[in-house]
Amino acid sequence: MANSTTSPDVPGNRKRHRKFRTWPLLVPAVSILAVWAIVPLILTVWYSFQNYNLQVPPAVWGGLINYEYLLTDPDLPVVVWNTLLMVFVPLIITIGLGLAFAVLYDGPFPGQPIARLLVITPFFVMPTVAALVWKNLFFHPVFGLLAWGEKLLGLEPVDWFSDYPMAAIIIIISWMWTPFATLILLTAMQSLDREQIEAARMDGAKVMARFRYVVLPHLTRPIAVLIMLETIFFLATYAEIYVTTSGGPGSATTNIPFYIYSRALQGFDVGLASAAGVFAIIIANIVAYFFARAMSEQL
Amino acid sequence: MLLKKLLMTTSVALLTTAGIAQAETTLTIATVNNPDMVVMQKYSAEYEKEAGVKLNWLVLDENTLRQRVTTDIATKGGQFDVITIGLYETPIWGKQGWLMPFDDMPASYDVADILPTVKDALSYDGHLYSVPFYAESSMTFYRKDLFEKAGLTMPDHPTWTQITDFASKLDDKANGVAGICIRGLAGWGENMALLGLMGNVYGGTQFNMDWTSAVNSPAWNNAINAYVKLANDYGPPGVVGNGFNENLNMLAEGKCAMWNDATVAAGLLFDPKRSKVADKLGIAANPVETWDKGGSWLWAWSLGIPSSSKNADEARKFIEWATSKEYINMIGEKEGWVTIPPGTRKSTYENPKYLEAAVFAPATLAAIEASSLTDNTAVPKPYVGINFAIIPEMQAINNYLGQQIAAALTGKMSVAEALDAAAANSDKIMKKAGYIK
């Protein structure tokens, strides 16, 4: 009796108490996060309204001068397009190849552990090192492996970074990130219930049908996670460009991060670089918004 | 006897350690990873012992060095006591009051011995703001053996038209020798260093008197068209990736017949230990064309002290040591005369040992002495500088111009399109910076 009368009060009390108790506990974490993320953001926004070249102090209020400069820059559409290319093309390649590798390496075959290790290895190579290796050992028109092969076939060696700079960068990025996709999808493959495949086979499903109706639906979640993570990484591609093409020839391989770098550190224009930073945040959020919408249906 | 000696050494060592521990100043030195600076770092251990200071080195490539040092000095970070800067930064930063002036140098240092064109370039308003470690101009290197075989003679003062003609006759890519090695890598300190000169000698300038860009003028169009033709037709494969170092290696390996670049490269190219063509090289002045001035650059890597340094006195003593006559002599005796840091002092070029070891020395001196930062273009210009304008906005403007020209070199756009785009970009930057009203 006594229990039944007090019990409706207990949850309410507990709720109020918890609210009261947890807030102070949250404050340190939230404030650190705020200082960590919000202060730099506010500073970036503040500087984006300043006309400030590091070599010509002091900073003076510039109003919208940096945004006006940025939005009327004839290179900006090219830069945004390059950024999108460097995100979506490697996404398709890495996930496509990752899927193929995951399915291939899933089944047992002799030497499987070593093969798996090798297919994952490129992921452990640092971006700058990977870019240097590709630049000097593979793509170089005089010393490169590809040039050597082309000469053997009696062809004129291709100078990748001047003739196909975007393709070259995309190849490097894809090479570096395919292992990551393989790793994630391979682990997911191993959690696939073998009996399902057995059952599908007994029902007469062929290889492609089993892949399409059993494996792929099982992998949609890891693929969604991959798309999200890789988009974040690909949006920030920088080292590969810095080491190989420096954003050129012309603006052929300049993406938003490299554009910011070239304005901030090559031109020392803090105001313009900040404005470009704010622009990058907006672009990233737009991309993130659409992905989050698409993802939320999957997760 | 042996024991006594051992005891003495130990006690001396102990004493020195104690002495150092007591009054040790640490100097942080930022420098560029060029061979001459690496030699300086090697010999600085002796200076550490002599002066009782500890030297903390930060050796970086040119671009990274420039970014680190500029960021530090502009925000008054005070990280560095000695910085390695160029002829470009010194007057700009001196004007801002970011560098300690080198007034009242001791008589033994002999400031008057520094080559006047170099000293003037490193001064602002009558004060010297950095002292040169080495200085350079540019010249034409060519293979005497190949010229002889083809029955050609290189004039002392060639023109670009002649250079193109020679390159066409000497180009033999089937046997791995390109007609010319030339800078293609984009950047204000890479392709633009040379192309700024070509713009001058074809009768152009980088800015009109009202600070609007002049790089899309007919003169610049002629210059860059000539360059693109020369580099594409007679340059090595992958020319757009070649900067100073790549070209230096190729010439030293005997893979090109000609090269126009820094005089400082001569020290390496004429050194039989490091170059396969040391005995086959000839030198001439850098080419001219329709106009005969502004055809070779002037550059110096020099040492300066940020105003924010807390050890300015010790820093100055170190700089005096590293740029002294005694230092140059020491390197000459120990490392070989051909490798000393060149281009800074008159006394270097009066030293018979150096003149004997370095056949290229008189040509280097002549090129440096002839380089004027002011009187060098066919039409009036508003800026100081030869192949680039010494203004803070230059790096952004010339990096972009360099990228556009690299794009034209790869055939991604026409020369006219590249120069128009670069001129528009330059005007935009100059408007934002308040030069163009």
Image (cartoon, helix red, strand yellow):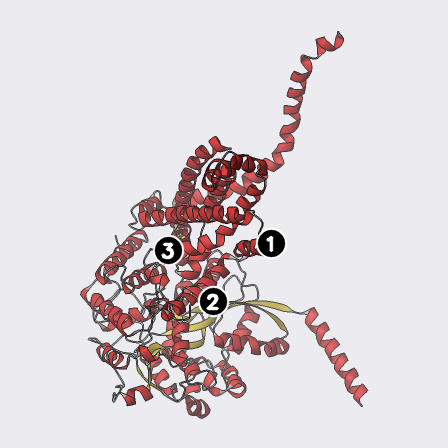
* Residue at image point 32% right, 50% down: A78
- Note whether B323 is above or below A239 in the view shown: below
For discs 2 and 3, the disc positioned in front in the rendered view:
3
Residue B208 seen in the figure:
no
Q: Tell me, for residue A167, which label it has, or none.
A: 3
The residue singled out by tag 2 in the image is B61
Chain of the residue on which disc 2 is drawn: B
Label 3, secondary structure: give it. helix
Residue A10 seen in the figure:
yes
Q: Nearest the camera: B200 or A171? A: A171
- Note whether A269 is above or below B89 in the view shown: above
Q: Nearest the camera: A68 or A234? A: A234
Q: Tell me, for residue A239, which label it has, or none.
A: none
Residues at marks 2 and 3, CA–CA distance in whole angstroms: 28 Å
Question: Outermost residue, top direction?
Answer: A1
For discs 1 and 2, the disc positioned in front in the rendered view:
1
Q: Amino acid at mark 1?
A: Pro
Label 1 CA crowd tier, 10 Å (few <14, some 14–19, many 20+): few
Chain of the residue on which disc 1 is drawn: A
Label 1, secondary structure: give it. helix
Q: Quadrant of residue B254?
A: bottom left
The residue singled out by tag 1 in the image is A113
Q: Nearest the camera: A153 or A282? A: A153
Chain of the residue on which disc 3 is drawn: A
Label 3 CA crowd tier, 10 Å (few <14, some 14–19, many 20+): some
Question: Picture coordinates of residue B54 (x, y %)?
Answer: 62, 70
